[in-house]
Amino acid sequence: MIKPEAEPACSDQALAQLCKALGNPIRVTILRYVLDHPDCIGNEILLHLPDDGPHAQSTLSQHLRQMRAADLLDAYSDGAAVCYRVNGERIGWLCAALAALRSSC
């Protein structure tokens, strides 16, 4: 696992930015879905969101854009489709940073 100290951008600010990216329950749901379904496309994600989730492609796109900006998700093109997978290194860093935070309590 990647230790938070190993990343140059390791700081309270970096951790806060990741937490902010996951600060919306819909984005946590999206992250869980992509973890379970790597290489999925946006329409698949949209169809599997809860009934109270966003049902507009543009809203989903905004959530995905925020998660990509935080490096939580990687995206690549497969023809006309954009496929998503979780950035394992970034999630590993987040887990390590949260564990370090817990150990300091």
Image: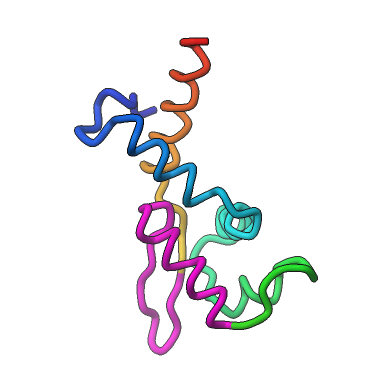
Pick the front one: 12 or 93: 12
Q: Position of residue 103 (x, y in %)?
A: 49, 11
Is 44 placed above or below 92 here?
Answer: below
Q: Farthest residue in the left direction?
A: 8
Q: Position of residue 93 (x, y in %)?
A: 38, 34
Q: Residue at x 61, y 71 (%)?
A: 45
Q: Position of residue 48 (x, y in %)?
A: 71, 70
Tell me the quarter of the picture where residue 54 sits. Answer: bottom right
Q: Position of residue 21 (x, y in %)?
A: 47, 51
* Count of residue discs: 0
Is 41 placed above or below 27 here?
Answer: below
Q: Residue at x 69, y 76 (%)?
A: 47
Q: Farthest residue in the right direction?
A: 51
Q: The N terminus is located in which quarter?
A: top left
Tell me the quarter of the picture where residue 94 sits. Answer: top left
- Residue range (magenta): 57-83
In the rendered structure, the answer to whether residue 75 lies left or right of residue 50 reads: left
Pick the front one: 84 or 53: 53
Tell me which colouring the rendered structure shows.
rainbow
Is residue 79 rendered magenta in the image? yes
Is residue 61 rendered magenta in the image? yes
